[in-house]
Amino acid sequence: MKIAWIACGALLGTALFLTPAAQAHHSNSAFYVTKVITIKGVVKEFRWSNPHVWVILTVDDGKGNKVDWKVEGRPPGILERSGWTPKSLQPGETVTIDLSPAKDATASGLIARVTKEDGTILSNAPPPTE
Amino acid sequence: MKLQNTLLGVIAGAVMLQAQGAPPDFSGVYYPLNPFGAFRGGPAAGGPPPAQRQGPPPRPTASAPLSDGSRGRTPDEPLLTPEYMAKWQMISKTRIAGTGEYDLTAKCLPPGMPAMMRMDYGMEVMQNKDKITFFGELNDALRRVYLDGRKPSQKVLDDPTYAGYSTGHWEGDTLVVDTVALRDNTFIEGFTPHSDAMTVHERIRFKEPGLLEDTITVTDPKALTKPWETVKTYRRATREKGNDELREFACPEGLGEAK
């Protein structure tokens, strides 16, 4: 299956040649939160856990290499109020993830939003309280 | 006639009690009006559902508010003495470098007072005559405010905690709370440091039905050049909106995965 990069920065290019990050509990300061890159791939695992949910996304770099991106999102409590459920993502489905890359240049990041193949958008925050 | 008079007396008494101000009931689940600071996450995060949009939603430009101090401090943040400003700058450097060594919540520790009253996620208030309890969804942070007239003992003062020790009383429809015995490794807000001399004063009231307002004054003669005031506002959730149940946070679940 050919999976295209939608956006690819220099940092992203570097990240592809490094080992994927160990799964860890991160401070937001571990990410370039005001930068957003986009990756597309196949969900290998979706972990609905506190204090962050995790998506392991297998991404084809276009050169025959597959890289497992480890992407973290906000806690289940917040995401539930944003329309997510523990079954929002299924292994094997193709999704596009907008994310802020990790400062350590590993294949990891912080979710800004997830877009499913049918166009459904899973955002990372509930609507603002009025 | 006699019974009538008695009944009238009871009703008049009840009305008078109400007029004298039976305290309001703050119990309920709330969400802050400005969660994640001023962050809105872009139109994709929290915008109208796809059917109501014209064209595809714009791409988000951020995943979270910048919180590393790289843009300096804003005038509405606490004014720090040189010693504590140096401490803030030191922590800022670690955050810009991408480490979370001073990030308490990333270690599943509670944010502590007064930072916890930002309630970036959800808040649940439980109230009775003698005590009001504030529960923050973020890291299951809890604080109790004693309303029965007790005062912090020397034992309490010698044993600082994240939430500190809070006592309160009603002034009309406003709950006035004083908090002491706070640990000095927490932050006032963000990663603004404070000393062991910090105390927190709050005035909490319904600004309008369902809209709770907490006016917080932080005093710290060692860390602040003058007391700092901030106002937090929270909207009460309702069963009709389906948002009146907070999910458990159980932060250490994720610590086990840390490598």
Image (spheres, grey):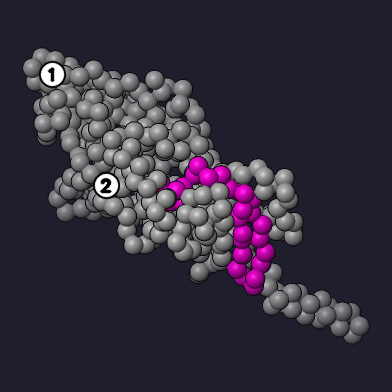
| Label 1 vs label 2, nearer the camera | 2
B27 relative to A93, above or below: below
Which residue is painted at 65% across and 42% down in the image? B159
Magenta-colored stretch includes residue B165:
yes
Out of A97 and B74, give the one closest to the viewer: B74
Which residue is painted at 54% across and 54% down in the image? B198
Name the amino acid, label 2: Ser
Chain letter of disc 1? A
Secondary-structure class at tag 1:
loop
Q: Which mark is residue A76?
A: none
Percent position (x, y) of residue B130?
A: 72, 56
Percent position (x, y) of residue B56?
A: 16, 47
Crowding around mark 2 (Cα neighbors within 10 Å: few <14, some 14 to 19, many 20+) is few
In this rendering, position of residue B33 left or right of residue B27:
left
Q: Residue furthest left?
A: A63
A44 relative to A121, above or below: above
Instruction: Tell me the quadrant of the picture where the N terminus of chain A can be found.
Output: top left
Q: Residue furthest bottom?
A: B1
Chain letter of disc 2? B
Which residue is painted at 70% across and 53% down in the image? B152
Q: Which mark is residue A1?
A: 1
Residue B34 in sight:
yes
In this rendering, position of residue B78 left or right of residue A35:
right
Out of A95 and A102, give the one closest to the viewer: A102
User: Which residue is tagged 2?
Assistant: B70
Residues indicated by labels 1 and 2 sit on the same polypeptide chain: no
Residue B67 in sight:
no
